[in-house]
């Protein structure tokens, strides 16, 4: 094969260009009707009352924490295995991240370890739905309610996945989405906060726009941020929503093809998906047995790249990065070092999937 199979590629098969040109011609290239339309359509699709767009998924997390009035002296529980954005934003508001180990099979936060880490300083839990799997929300909802703390879902990797038939992102007091270039639907960058709480939605909107009071221009009640989404980005997002069923179908096809090819291969373990979850797998990730492959994960990735297959490693746990000063959590540390994420984009052909799988199988036999 003489072409690189990239790890990710956006699916732009709708009328993205038409909508973006329309937004450009309207001269409303900052806010505008596409922003309003996307917020309305996205909230309706996910089944929540309010959706507030933001400039990124990270900005959405920051806004959610600020709206929940989390700050110095507070603690927020997050999983040890995730992209760094939740921890960084907890630190940004001056609170303390409390890192929780993960389930060794689902790779999501271990709910059996959550309650014992709640103190009188705990203000929120941020469950992260990793790779398209969904955390055990029934238990987390009960823990949050009994402890009177916020439940803030990080849905960056699990847009359109469901738990007990309800969309991920429809359970939390606040839920945060990312529309970065590799995500299920994309605006290049961009994010959103979803909530059913009117007061929280108002706080998010005000904080997103420099803390300016709605309806009273240049009057500021709080110190806010410029986290607004542009109309051109929202135009791209509106077009993506129109083709979302096609994108979901294609992502499901990609996942099934990998499972068919690799589920019987010794030395690889797929992420366990509980029966309560109907996933839309954002990234097909495997935990590899380094003894079976006779090389470590990073060496395997290097060899696959030599064969024109781009992959990604698992997230480094916070507990192994000195910056975060976190105590050791053995399961996250063990799982993360063996995870490899394979090309998973919607337009990935069956032939390319088969090629990736054949290369993995050949490396297992070497």
Image (spheres, rainbow, N blue to C red):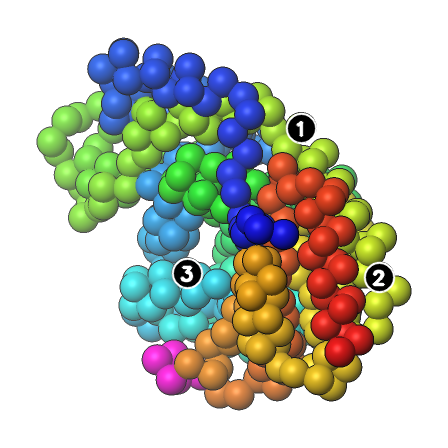
Q: Which residue is mark 2?
A: 263
Nearest-to-viewer mark from 2 and 3: 2
Ranked by sequence position, the earlier of labels 2 and 3 is 3
Residue 157 marker: none
Q: Is residue 9 magenta?
A: no
From mark 1 to mark 2, how far is it between C-alphas? 25 Å
Q: Residue at x 44, y 61 (%)?
A: 86
The answer to which quarter of the image holds residue 161 is: top right
| Residues at discs 1 and 3 in contact (Cβ within 8 Å) | no
Above or below, 270 against 120 in this view is: above
Coordinates of residue 278 in the picture (x, y in percent): 76, 45
Q: Nearer the viewer, mark 1 or mark 3?
A: 1
Q: Which residues are magenta?
A: 322-326
Q: Is residue 250 visible?
A: yes
Mark 3 — residue? 85
Quarter of the figure that contains the C terminus: bottom right
Residue most extreme to the front: 2
**What's the residue at 49%, 18% (across, down)?**
15
Taking the image as shown, residue 354 lies to the left or right of residue 148, namely right
- In the figure, 200 relative to 5: above or below? above
Q: Secondary structure at mark 1?
A: helix
* Magenta stretch: helix, strand or loop mostly: helix
Image coordinates for residue 208, horizontal then vertical, percent? 29, 40
Whether residue 198 sits left or right of residue 110 in the image: it is left
């Amino acid at each position: 094969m003489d072409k690189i199979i990239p790890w990710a590629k956006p699916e732009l098969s709708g009328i993205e260009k038409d909508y973006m040109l329309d937004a450009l011609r309207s001269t409303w290239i900052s806010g505008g009707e596409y922003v309003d339309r996307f917020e309305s359509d996205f909230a309706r699709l996910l089944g929540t009352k309010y959706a507030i767009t933001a400039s990124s998924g990270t900005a959405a997390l920051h806004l959610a924490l600020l709206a929940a009035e989390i700050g110095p002296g507070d603690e927020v529980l997050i999983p040890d295995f995730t992209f760094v954005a939740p921890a960084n934003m907890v630190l940004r508001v001056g609170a303390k991240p409390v890192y929780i180990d993960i389930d060794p099979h689902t790779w999501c936060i271990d709910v059996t370890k959550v309650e014992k880490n709640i103190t009188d300083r705990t203000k929120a839990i941020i469950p992260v739905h990793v790779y398209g799997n969904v955390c055990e929300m029934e238990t987390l909802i009960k823990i949050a309610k009994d402890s009177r703390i916020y439940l803030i879902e990080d849905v960056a990797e699990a847009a359109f996945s469901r738990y007990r038939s309800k969309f991920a992102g429809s359970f939390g007091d606040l839920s945060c989405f990312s529309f970065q270039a590799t995500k299920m639907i994309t605006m290049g960058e961009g994010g959103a906060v979803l909530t059913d709480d009117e007061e929280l939605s108002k706080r998010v909107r005000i904080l997103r726009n420099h803390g300016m009071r709605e309806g009273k221009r240049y009057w500021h009640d709080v110190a806010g941020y410029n986290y607004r989404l542009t109309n051109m980005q929202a135009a791209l997002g509106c077009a993506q929503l129109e083709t979302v069923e096609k994108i979901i179908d294609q992502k499901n096809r990609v996942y099934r093809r990998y499972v068919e090819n690799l589920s019987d291969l010794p030395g690889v373990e797929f992420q366990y998906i509980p029966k309560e979850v109907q996933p839309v797998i954002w990234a097909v990730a495997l935990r590899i047995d380094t003894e079976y492959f006779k090389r470590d994960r990073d060496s395997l990735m290097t060899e696959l790249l030599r064969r024109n297959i781009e992959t990604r490693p698992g997230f480094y746990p916070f507990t192994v990065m000195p910056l975060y000063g976190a105590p050791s959590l053995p399961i996250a540390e063990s799982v993360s070092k063996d995870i490899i994420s394979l090309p998973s984009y919607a337009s990935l052909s069956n032939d390319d999937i088969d090629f990736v799988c054949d290369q993995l199988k050949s490396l297992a036999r070497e």
